Amino acid sequence: MTSALELREVRKQFGRTEIIRGVNLDIAKGERHALIGPNGAGKSTTFNLISGRIAPTSGSVKLNGFDIGGLPPYKINRMGLSRSFQVTNIFHRLSVFENLRCAVLWALGYRYSFWHRLEQLRDARERAEAVLELIGLQGRHDTPAGLLTYAEQRALEIGITIAGGAEVILLDEPTAGMSRSESDHAVELIRRVTVGKTLVMVEHDMSVVFGLADRISVLVYGEVIATDTPQAIRNNRRVKEAYLGTTLDEATGAH
């Protein structure tokens, strides 16, 4: 198995409090991997450690074999990892198209320059329009992003996350706050835009997790207590106990 992401004995302390307690993860290239666990388990902290928002206290985080632990987020992004956040993070006054064009500029080699007119950058326009079509927002091309519905804003953020061409995508609660029909649509969108890429997601909706993930890791009190296929996780006694008696069958609607 070739690892896209590899965490070895990763620990994170805030003062004397240890939040992440020796996490080990191997996520294969092209895999869709879900990280689940009760509230306060350390899922968002693990995401922040992977994406560079915070540095590990000890242990190693590797992206495609390169140690990225402690690197700033922009350097990790340039190495091929992109992430979304729990709170929608878009430019509300820019149009949907302009949001996507901003996301592709750096990936295409356009740094901070004052001599390029955006309207003349054909490659940026074409890639942004391709992502716009991929996420199904062609009809919202010129709409200010702040006027989109909540589900459309989440779709736009997913588009921004993939627009730069990253091969490893981290999605933090991509369906949070959505209705069931919106959530089903988001699952199909995520499945479509991550073909051939590595996906790691934190998600509380178990039907989304079990509908998307190839493998699932369960984090409890800063430790991974199980990593396995969805069916094996569904039947794992320790995992059921971690959810305080609510079986995963109930959470996913299975019988």
Image (tube, rainbow, N blue to C red):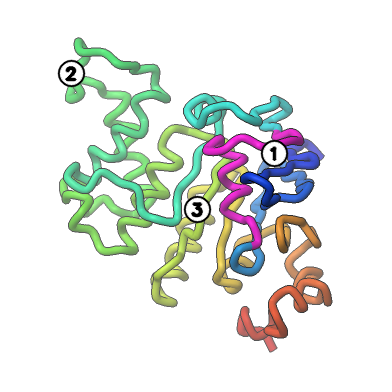
Residue to which mark 3 is pinned: 192
Q: Position of residue 93 (x, y in %)?
A: 17, 45
Identified by mark 3, the residue type is Arg
Which residues are the magenta region? Answer: 41-61
Residue placed at 76% from the left, 50% from the top?
21
- Amino acid type assigned to the residue bearing label 2 in the image: Arg
Q: Of marks 2 and 1, which one's residue comes earlier in the chain? A: 1
State the residue position of label 1.
Answer: 5
Most extreme residue toward the top, as rendered? 115
Q: Position of residue 204 (x, y in %)?
A: 56, 68
Queried whether the magenta region covers residue 166, the answer comes back as no
On the rendered image, what quadrant is the C terminus found in? Answer: bottom right
In the rendered image of this protein, does residue 111 appear above or below residue 13? above
Task: Give the Cα separation between the discs numbered 2 and 3.
Answer: 32 Å
Circle 3: element type: helix
Asked which quadrant contains residue 107, the reply is: top left
Q: Nearer the viewer, mark 2 or mark 3?
A: 2
Q: CA distance from mark 3 to mark 1?
A: 21 Å
Q: Which of the marked residues, 2 or 3, is nearer the chain's N terminus?
A: 2
Residue 20 higher or lower than 218, as above or below? above
What residue is pinned by disc 2? 117
